[in-house]
Image (spheres, rainbow, N blue to C red):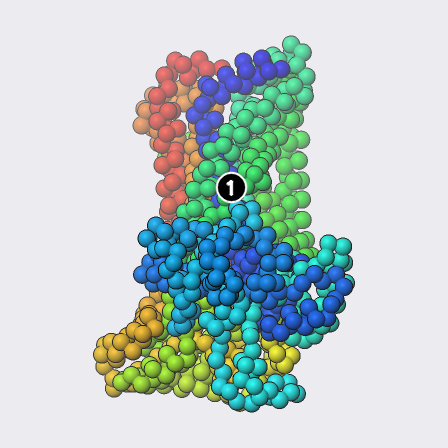
Amino acid sequence: MFPVFRSLSLRYLRLRWDRAALVVASIALGVATLVSTRILNQSLEAAAHDTMTPIPTANLYITNGDVGVLRQVADDVNRAKIAGVESASAILFEQIRLVGLGSPEGRVGLLVAADLDQLSNSKSTKAFTYRILDFGAVRSRTGVFISEFLWNERRTQGISDQTPVRLSYADRELEAPLAGVLEIDDQSKASSFQRNLVALDLNLALKLIKIEFPPIAAFVGSSLIGAFDTVRGDRVSRIDINMEPSADLERTRQAVQAVVGNRASVKTLEEQKKSTDDVIGGIQIGFTLCSAGALVVGLFLVYNALSVSVAERRHDIGILRSLGATRIQIARLFAGEAILLGIAGAVFGIPLGCYLADFAINMLKGDLDSMFLNPDIRPTRLSAWTMFAAMAAGVLTALLAALVPAIQAAHDQPADAVRRSPSAYSGLVRRLHLAACLLFIGAGLAMVLFRNALPPRTGSYVGIVLILIGMFLALPILIGWLAYLMLPLFRMFLGIEARLAADNLVRSPARTGVVIGALAAGVSLMIQTAGVGRSNEEPIKKWVEQVIQADAFVFSGSLTSANSSLAPMQPAVGEAMQKVDGVERVVGLRFMRPEYEGTVICMLAIDAQDYSRGTRARLPQGLPSLEAFDRLPEGDVIVVSDNFAARFKKKEGDVVTLPRRQGGPVNLTIIGVGQDYTWSKGTIFMDRKRFKEIFEDDFVDVFHVYFRDDADPIATRRHLEQAVVPWKLAVENRGFVKDFLAGVIDKIYKLAYLQQVLVAIVAALGVVTALLISVLQRRRELGLLRAVGATQWQVLKTVMAEAFLMGAIGTVLGIALGLPMEWYILRVVLFEESGFWFEMIIPWKEALGIGLVAIAVATIAGLIPALRAVQLRIVDAIAYE
């Protein structure tokens, strides 16, 4: 069989190298979007998991989200001697800065702190090994261990091992001797932090990050606490439970939970990951759907090219069948061509996908670095599984596209094929085509309608994908009908060249319909993205205009890190700013990410009355939630965002129960519901003074500073900047903050547009392929036109008119499909993901721009086939066939 494949298939591909190149390019772009999406999703997932559960080496985890856990809980578990528990280790993770290393501000690092005696006997040591440089610092537990990367960076900067390591957190600094180097293997649980890990003894770390409370007696639950050290407590991020190999996981978890009580939750690693995946899952699925769209569009175009390949070689196929070739051998011949093209497309698509992933990560680098504990987010290395998936996607795309043409070629009767009679099998193919369209659309509608009975996201996402595939499959049929209905209008109002182009569309709806469908897919995705972006952006910008009323904003690091509670400030900063001449009031905000009903939500502690009064003075019409903000200092009360209320089905008067480190969970009563877009899973607002009492946290992430009406804003800001110099803080104005928030939205949609541009490129390649095929199929017709007096310019205009009509019809259908998709994304997908209810805004301006670009691209794509058409010699064209 290989000699036949070599003499027929390989020879054909060499002769039609330009068409084969276009098919390979279509597959390569689809594979590239798949690879880039997979790498991007894996990078985001790894960074999110590293932030929620860094260095996951234990069997069970005692956690409270951002609230933290009392160190004493680990002692209680160890004293309980629970069957199956090897050890319980209190672990602290915090983002700190290494002063004097890297940039002038210092290099960001991840601090991991634990009791070194417990750590040395636990599974956690598998994450890294120690190389001791100062035995005295190790024995006294006053030394710092740094990763090998940081150690090499110190040496490069000429810093000796005897020079102490300087660490800073908020406005505090700790200077400690370098005790040793952490050697981290690429396959270890700590591999993500090879470039920035710092390890300390837990007691030493708590001196750096512990919150100092005044030494007064306080009630915690029903117990009177009078000792200073007990009131402030020792907050750790989590407690790792290492189990004996033979222990039963669930039974041990229940036993540990009984000891922990209501002070925290005991979870497995899978349960920890589940809450993280819930936050980033919607973004990941959105990226995946875009990449799937590129593959589907590529599949249609490959199908188109291979269908024509079969049609061109029916005569050869008939001869082969007459000489004894079986139907299976004919089908294998075309399947082999498809596999070859698929492999070639995947080979080119994989490196392109890696480049696109790197480009996307770099575009969002500043935001990602501040959002996650790992400040050096890099694209995940190309895994063997991703490479296999990419190769399989390329080959399967080509094989699926070749399936129908191959079966059709194999079932042609030899005599019909040799005589070039119409295929008797084509009628069955059309019926199967229509049945497949109805099946996809019906299955998709059923999944959407019954999505509440299916696993989360399955119905809303998979259902719409099936509907879209069915609709795109049906486009050739629809376009055949549409072109037939429009043909009288074309003949009445268009010139001879355009009428010939329209006639060709009617005669070949299967070929042109696939390409028009690809154009419609690209246009619809862009219209949907533009509409969703506008519908999100306009209400969010309006909300930002209302709630951002301060004259200056003070934070450490960047605004992203401030909103992520990774760069906190001491409350003393606010006290210093309040004394600045011209400052009317200073409002502190603190962010925390607790878990509620298995979902990570946002808690925002704010100086409620100061914020309410400062905002009301600048916003006379007021905000509906401002009245409720005035009541926040009254006690255990909260205001919740409208998406929190929608997601968890809460209303005013309902109670929300949240964990805290000691004293058991706290019940908070909802006194107001207001519009807020801070967090996609819901936001809770609490007065900062009460937050400090409940959660033992007095840090501030960002200060809103209001100037007096009679103050000089320029002079006041200058004095404010001077006041915060000791803390090395940033001061920005209202315009900067508004631009930053708008930029975050723009960057997210730029990634979506990047993927959809690839879909558009694939569609443009489809136009080139379709028109090249059209020229080949119509060589005799074009030759006859030239023979009866048509000029080269008229033939050129005929082919270009066909490209224009394909672009125009694809654009109209794309807009018609894109608007319902926008409605579905806003009212179903986004609402179920976040609880936000956005009014649908039709992006007329963007639709006009996208439509003009699509038509222009389609018309320009027809230029190469048009030039090829005019180069046909009349004698050769007429002699063809």
Question: Percent x, y for residue 721?
Answer: 28, 75
Examine the rendered structure and indicate whether residue 105 appears above or below residue 633: above
Q: State the residue in front, 702 or 471.
A: 702
Question: Percent x, y for residue 828?
Answer: 58, 61
Q: Which residue is drawn at 45% across and 67% down?
A: 566
Examine the rendered structure and indicate whether residue 410 appears above or below residue 586: above
Q: State the residue in front, 314 or 709.
A: 709
For residue 557, what is the image quadrant? bottom left
Residue 201 in view in this figure: yes
* Residue with the most extreme front position: 136
Question: Percent x, y for residue 602?
Answer: 53, 71
**Mark 1 burial class by Cα count in 10 Å: few <14, some 14-19, many 20+:** some
Q: Residue at x 38, y 69 (%)?
A: 556
Q: Residue at x 40, y 67 (%)?
A: 175
Q: How many labels does the image show?
A: 1
Residue 691 in view in this figure: no
Question: Percent x, y for residue 790?
Answer: 34, 23
Q: State the residue in front, 475 or 110.
A: 110
Examine the rendered structure and indicate whether residue 523 appears above or below residue 762: below
For residue 436, what is the image quadrant? top right
| Helix, strand or loop at mark 1 | loop
In the figure, is residue 272 to the left or right of 574? right
Q: Name the residue under label 1.
A: 382
Which amino acid, mark 1? Answer: Leu
Q: Which residue is drawn at 65% across and 75% down?
A: 263
Examine the rendered structure and indicate whether residue 421 appears above or below residue 192: above
Split into 4 quadrants, where in the image is the N terminus? Answer: top right
